[in-house]
Image (cartoon, rainbow, N blue to C red):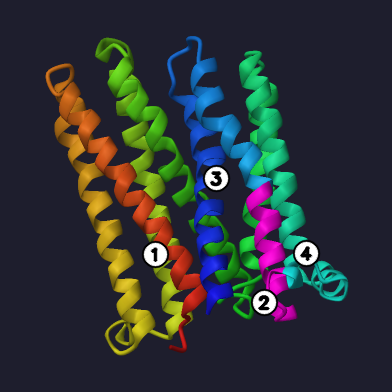
Amino acid sequence: MVWATAFALNKWLLYGALSVVIGGTATMLLWTPRRDIRAQVQAYLLPATVAGPLFAATGFLVQVGTFAEAGLPGMVDPLYLSILWQSPAGAVALLQSLGFVAALLAALCLLRHYRRWATALWLLGTLLLLLPFSWRGHTVDASLWVRAALSLHVGLAAWWMGALYPLWHLSRHGDPALYGDAMAQFGQLASWLVALLAACGTWVLYSLIGGFGPLVQSGYGLSMLLKLALVATVLLLAAQNKWRLVPRLPATAAGLSGSIRAEMLVGVAILLVTALLSTLTGPGH
């Protein structure tokens, strides 16, 4: 149980870093007004790109320790290191690390205002980070389409969660006359992408538990309902931003900032519940 809890917490941190490099980079590339964003890159993107490979490596070592069953020294047991490195766990850690390295290079390109290079590296990093989600976990034996839907669902969720800090920063420190259009454009695209996110998530959930009845008939289902309640909260906050607060800028600038901050806090909770659900329980519980 200790190892499983450690792995879940490591996943939580990894999901956070992944969200930053996917959603944060995309937002700075597409919706941040064309001004100097070096401060945001240094404070937001670079720490995540550096921490990401560390979380990927730590997650792999925790799995080694779980198999070795020899306490902390078991995390570096040569035999189990070799066995796990040649398993999907090793491939996942390697791809995740490479994905974060690509994201680091994208952030460095943003510092130099090389947006085309940053975009290409961001796309590469995103692909490397999302592929492993279809290789392990509860969907490992599912069809190719379900696993692809899971990777897409994760990518869209990461895009949404990671976009919140740059948008909040704009709402706190930017001029509403400049960022209002960016917020409106983000809201328009988000409407379509969130709908796709929900569709993918619903399909994956239905495939995992064999219908929607088990949502109220199992521990896993009840835990999933908690996550769905948190997601519904974020959707309500996002709807308020799109239809009430953004159209009334600049009068609602303070309210928009508070609403986005609330979204971030609920988003952190969603990532934690996701990490716990994918580690400590499963569809069969």
**Of the residues tagged 2 and 1, which is closer to the observer?**
2
Structural distance between the alpha carbons of marks 2 and 1: 21 Å
Magenta residue span? 54-72
Give the residue type at disc 4.
Gly
Instruction: Name the quadrant of the C terminus.
Output: bottom left
Give the residue type at disc 1.
Val
Structural distance between the alpha carbons of marks 3 and 2: 23 Å
Q: Tag 2's secondary structure?
A: helix
Structural distance between the alpha carbons of marks 4 and 1: 25 Å
Residue 63 colored in magenta in the image: yes
Tell me the residue that label 3 is attached to.
17
Tell me the residue that label 1 is attached to.
273
Question: In the rendered structure, which disc, 4 or 1, sits on the residue that comes first in sequence?
Answer: 4
User: Is 221 situated left or right of 176 in this image?
Assistant: right
Tell me the residue that label 2 is attached to.
66
Could you tell me residue 217's position as x and y percent? Answer: 30, 90
Q: Tag 3's secondary structure?
A: helix
Which one is nearer the viewer's eye here, 226 or 157? 226
**Of the residues tagged 4 and 2, which is closer to the observer?**
2
Q: Are marks 3 and 1 in contact (CB under 8 Å)?
A: no
Q: Quadrant of residue 107?
A: top right
Give the residue type at disc 2.
Thr
